[in-house]
Image (tube, rainbow, N blue to C red):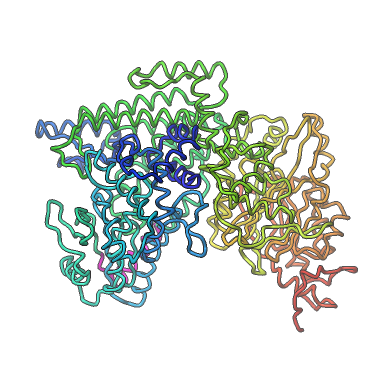
Amino acid sequence: MGMAYRKAKLDLYYTTSPSVTAIADYEANLEANLRALRKRINGKSADWVKEPDFLGGYVYLPTTVKVVTRSEDDDELMVSAPADLWRQIRDRMATEAPTNRPTAEFRLTAKCSIDLHVLSTLWMMKVGHKFDDSLTVSAYGNRLRRQANGGLNELSLGSFSPYMAPFRTWRDEGLSSMRKALSEDKRIVAITADVSSFYHELDPRFMQDSAFVSGVLGLELTGPEEKLNGLFIEAIRAWAALTPLRRGLPVGLPASAVIANMALIELDRAMEREVVPLYYGRYVDDIMLVMENGKGFSTPTELWNWLFSRSNGRLTRDSGETEGVRYSAPYLGDSRILFANNKNKIFLLHGVSGRVMVESIARQIHQRASEWRSLPNLPEHATAVATEMVTATQIDGEGADNLRKTDSLTMRRAGFALQLRDLEAYERDLEPEAWREHRLAFYEAFLEHVLVLPNFFELAAYLTRVIRLATACKDFEKLAEIVLAVTDVIESVRSDCHVHVKSKPTRELQTSMVLRKWSGYVRESIYEAVVSAFPSLLSPSEVIRWDAAVASLDPLTVGHFRLDVDALMVGHDRLFAHDLAYSPLRFAFLPPEIVRGLASVPTDLPQVPISLMPLVVRRGLKSIIGWIGLQMIPIGLAFPTRPFSLAELFIVAPRPFALDSQKEISGAMLALRGFSLVSRLPYLDGPTNPSLVLQSQDPSSMKRIALGSWKTTDGSWVASVMRHVDPDQDRYRRLNTLINEAISQSGEIDYLILPELAIPANWFMRIAQKLQAKGISLIAGVEYLHYGDGGIRNQVWAALGHDGLGFPSMTIYRQDKQRLALHEEQQLHRLAGLTLDPTSIEQPLTVIDHGGFSFAILVCSELTNIDYRAQLRGRIDALFVPEWNRDTTTFEALIESAALDIHAYIVQCNDREYGDSRIRAPYRDAWKRDIVKIKGGVRDYIVTGDIDVGSLRQFQSSYRSPDGPFKPVPDGFFMAPGRRSLPARD
């Protein structure tokens, strides 16, 4: 039961309408609640599944506002203010007919009890996975998480495979099949379709029908499985009976997706076996079919009639109120599965025009994917924020990125989501004052362009994220304005619109009930968003500002919610302890330099009942609490919504690369995320002068190195020493622009190196994760880390990609500078009385074996240590030297000599102010030795160069150095055995 709850919690947290307060309330008595539920499940009576308290309720969520008429002037008249445009539409429609009003459309969505969520998840774990396993490979969406051997992953967080990967596969494989056929000069036809109101029109009784379970699927359920299946299906039917729709699946209950998938399994089989297309794929209720147009179809009727004849009678034409194509099966009973004509689209493609269309869609996909892969780009001027908002919410503007998107609604949502993602990143990385003007510009544009009909209905799902953003940034005045504007939108719907609920006849609708439930849900969602993001610390002036903001709200809007500061702080701490707040609980246990602005950890974290977790999970969690200094397992870590990543475990584990830590880290990942690590983790090999061994994503011998010509101002340096706010407000924008330049490079970059003290430590992880998604490892100096009383550390961090775990991952390696440069030491003492406090004295001699590429890191003045250079000779292919160095003349000679006496590639990256960043090689020909050499410039940029590791090793492996392409190895050179390769014959 405990693991069923853990999955259910995560599934519910990421639905469109979670109640984090309800989850926290349930967890307050988690063991008793789960024991009571298990007793009911094991009991003889089944009547309890029909009790309203067990089932929960429902809410109405907005979908769209329909304007049923248009004026002839609409295409000629352009109105910039959305509120003015709405008033014009409303008044014109009322003038044409007194009862002619816009129609506000809602969708009924489940708000099930936590008990029902747990029951449904338990059903998926014990029964539903057998149904899911019957699906063919053509069903891409909402598939349950499985292990590598195909069995259900009972320990994984969440029930389903991540959304994006299967969606992209579904979309991209369809486009790929079209490209291939068109390149072979075939005529093809592509069909896209989706089911109208799919969940609302399904009757789940077929999941108990033996004609389906045994006859169609060939499943034989055991007695306990049949009982659990019956309890769950009866609960679904009972919930539907309590709603005005009287039928359907609960939208918002994750298990509904498994039932929905099963309803179309015979359609999948018919398409695969009878039609035998070039491609067929189904993403829940979205269909994509590609086939040769050998029959010469020229009309939809011809095509559909041909498909009808090959569907075993499952597809027929429906000529009811909504025309379309109907799918039916004897066991589906009263279900109504209709592919409505207004959603079905047929594409006849051939020749150049067909290829152009497909390539156009592919370009849109690549462009959108590039935007999501990129780091947020804070506009140079705040006024640009409003411009981006207008672009994201305008009716026309962007092309579709797949065949389903022929209207621009989905693209507008994607554009707004992208902008909001950027703002949330700024909140995580920057102090509020550093981007205040941009934030205020966003709020103004949000108030004008989103919090107005009809736009609000299209973007309502993002409201709580904006509320959390404003709360976390302490923009209390704007928060109050947003709440008041939402209230105005609700009143506008009540006064100006007809109300319609999808799948519900209008004549049976109680408009007042719909609006009451919707407005109540909106108020509750806003309140929970405020509590989840409420700051843990407020100054007296900020308390006054908060109280003034609350006083400006209508008492009816506030309702019964407690909005005094003390109550909100208590509520926030409670959600934070359960990993339900805006900031994840794990942030409290990461080093403070990585997480910005997090208050101290609550001292009374609720503990998890041990009996609810299997032994393997308990063991892994005990390792973690040992690393982070806790005695008991907090419930928010045992049942997380946003658990530690593997890279973060390498940071919190005290000895992450020690061989005896391998088992503990592997066990922690199994406990947190439910998968076993299939190969060796990165580890230190050797007691003295060790090597850090990682399996790389790219075993090739050619490595492409990107040097970042990046400037850190003296003001930023002083601010980091004094722990003041960075005066360079453009630094964040400049850095993200530089990183995006690396991400967008057409050639594959293997390593990006930035100078010493280049970036704040709390920016590093996010940047490294973006680069890792492109297969780029990052080596960069981070700003001084302050420890204890007057101690600092000057570190270089390396985020190194590896795939030895069965999936792409990232390891964080941190290396201390051992001694300060003379001028650096003097300045630190003069400004703040600081001294260096390194964590390890052996790190400069650590060789990193990254998939067969061996390199080491020396930080700036450490290059002058001849003992370091001597001990690294023969052990490395390359030496990375991040610097902030004014004495470029001295270091020019050092770099040139080091390339020859170490006999390795030297990668020097200095601050742009001083330049002389270069990649130096020990080539015989002098003109080849500087592969890259850069200096100066008025903007930050990157330059790439290739180093041939294989050629260097082959040269060094000869007993006597051959005649080129490198200089002979120096006297006394001994090559490490692990670097040897087969020499070339002259």
In the image shown, does 100 or 9 lie closer to the viewer? 9
Camera sees residue 381? no
Q: Is residue 521 left or right of residue 370?
A: left
Q: Is residue 777 magenta?
A: no
Instruction: Name the outermost residue toward the right.
Output: 972
Count of picture labels: 0
Magenta-highlighted stretch: main secondary structure? helix
Instruction: Name the outermost residue toward the bottom.
Output: 986
Instruction: Name the outermost residue toward the left.
Output: 97
Quarter residue 561 falls in: top left
- Quadrant where the C terminus sits is bottom right
- Residue 535 spot, x, y in % from top left: 53, 27
| Residue drawn 90% across the image and 68% down it | 972
Q: Is residue 639 left or right of residue 592?
A: left
Quarter residue 876 falls in: bottom right
Quarter residue 213 falls in: bottom left
Camera sees residue 446? yes
Is the residue 735 above or below the residue 598 in the image? below
In the image shown, does 309 or 604 lie closer to the viewer? 604
Is the residue 877 above or below the residue 39 in the image? below
| Residue drawn 64% across the image and 68% down it | 699
Task: Give the residues in magenta.
Answer: 347-364
- Residue 648 spot, x, y in % from top left: 63, 46
In the image shown, does 692 or 37 lie closer to the viewer? 37
Q: Is residue 434 left or right of residue 520?
A: right
Q: Is residue 358 magenta?
A: yes
